[in-house]
Amino acid sequence: MSVIQAPRGTFDVLPADMARRAVLEAHAERILGAAGYARIETPTFEATELFARGVGQATDIVQKEMYTFDDGGGRSLTLRPEGTAPVCRAYMEHGMHKLGQPVKLWYLSSFYRAEAPQRGRYRQFWQVGAEAIGSAGPDTDAELIVLLADLLLAMAVREVRLRLSSLGTPETRAEYRRELAEYLHAHEDGLSPEVVARIDLNPMRAFDAGDRTTRETMRGAPTLLDRLADEDAEHFARVRELLDGAGIGYELDPTLVRGLDYYARTVFEFTSDALGAQSGVGGGGRYDGLIEQLGGKPTPASGWAAGVERILLSASEQPIAPDVVDLFVAVAKPDADVAAFALANEARGAGMSAQMELAGRSLKGQLKHADRIRARYVAIIGDTMDVSLKDMESGAQTEVHSTAVIPTILRGSRLA
Ligand code: AMP
């Protein structure tokens, strides 16, 4: 029979990988918790409709990347491809609008997208995300950006760049799109045929073109940032002022887009040049229209999501302290295992980390194993009430009564 492997685009998080993930989780807890964000976990799957409405029918995610299935009762469910729509659903479902606003939430969860797998792009991946729901203020946006910057700094992510822009309102964008399309049509001679073919479909794509002539032509194109309404321009100026004050560097990138109509104003993306092709580490923005789109009252909101695997791939390797095992209980005789079992249990009850021999090794093998797992002490149980306690660092060994093992270790006195 062939051996079954993990599905394409998925991976096992092995114990050796878990330590760095735990570090990331602890930093997120500390940094986001200190700013008043509380952790939330939503279901792994949701009604398909939530993502169709909340991510957008026209997006790649909804068009071709969702794992959608029938639950057997005729209901269409989908493995969550992102976290914002589920968090907004939870906000509405639990009446969180009645709490003090904004409601600040964060999550660290797995997400699912049927994408072509490559380094940094998986079909099951993890995101850490933060959402502030119920505040329209530029300070909320700036705070969110600072928190993600702090997290990336704490994780020692290398070669980080922040791109920042403002999308204004859907009306401004529609007007701008018309103006840009007009400009492109008037300059078709200076554009590549691919760009010309897509002018009416998606004029913004022209900014991404790689060929020199098109790039040259785009230099004279109008940008959305220059067309913002006064209120939106003021909001954006304030976000920038706050970031400047916090010492956060960024590049203005008027071509930064979020495909959907319910996005408004601030958008941003952090990238790492250490990542290669999939350089996006995390991004977000203001999504003032989303909750209404999901059937709620108009509620301003803002947030971000960052990829856990991308953070770990782009982070410098930081030394991780190995786990400490306070006590390893070895058995010198086969029938000593009942006493060994009791001692290991008692040690854990006293707050220590303790393991006992479980593989039937010789005493020599057990000591070798204790050394490998970095046990600080080994208690060797024989056939009397006395236990040989060995300090693995100094090598010293003494006989102590079995009731004295735990107090001796707790005192932490080095055996001489
Ligand atoms: P998005 O929700 O598409 O805005 O993505 C936010 C972040 O999640 C990206 O910047 C990536 O770091 C990460 N991400 C998105 N899709 C994937 C994926 N398929 N595999 C791994 N990380 C991903």
Image: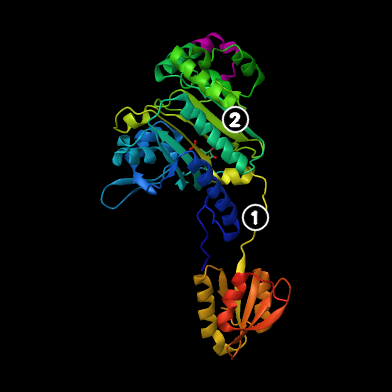
Give the mark nearer the N terminus: 1 vs 2.
2
Q: CA distance from mark 1 to mark 2?
A: 28 Å
Based on the displayed image, in which of its 4 quarters is residue 146 positioned? top right
Boundaries of the magenta span: 182-193
Residue 104, visible in the rendered structure: yes
Looking at the rendered image, the disc whose residue lies closer to the viewer, 1 or 2, is 1
Q: Which residue is rendered at x = 59% and y = 70% of the image?
A: 410
Q: Of the numbered discs in the image, which one, if any, rests on residue 162?
A: 2
Q: Is mark 1 within 8 Å of ligand 1?
A: no
| In this view, 326 is above or below 212 | below
Measured from the top left, where is residue 193 in percent x and y? 57, 19
Crowding around mark 1 (Cα neighbors within 10 Å: few <14, some 14 to 19, many 20+) is few
Q: Secondary structure at mark 1?
A: loop
Measured from the top left, where is residue 202 in percent x and y? 48, 22
Q: Which residue is rendered at x = 70% and y = 75% of the image?
A: 415
Q: How are the colours assigned in the image?
A: rainbow
Dot 1 amino acid type: Ile
Q: Of the numbered discs in the image, which one, if any, rests on residue 320?
A: 1
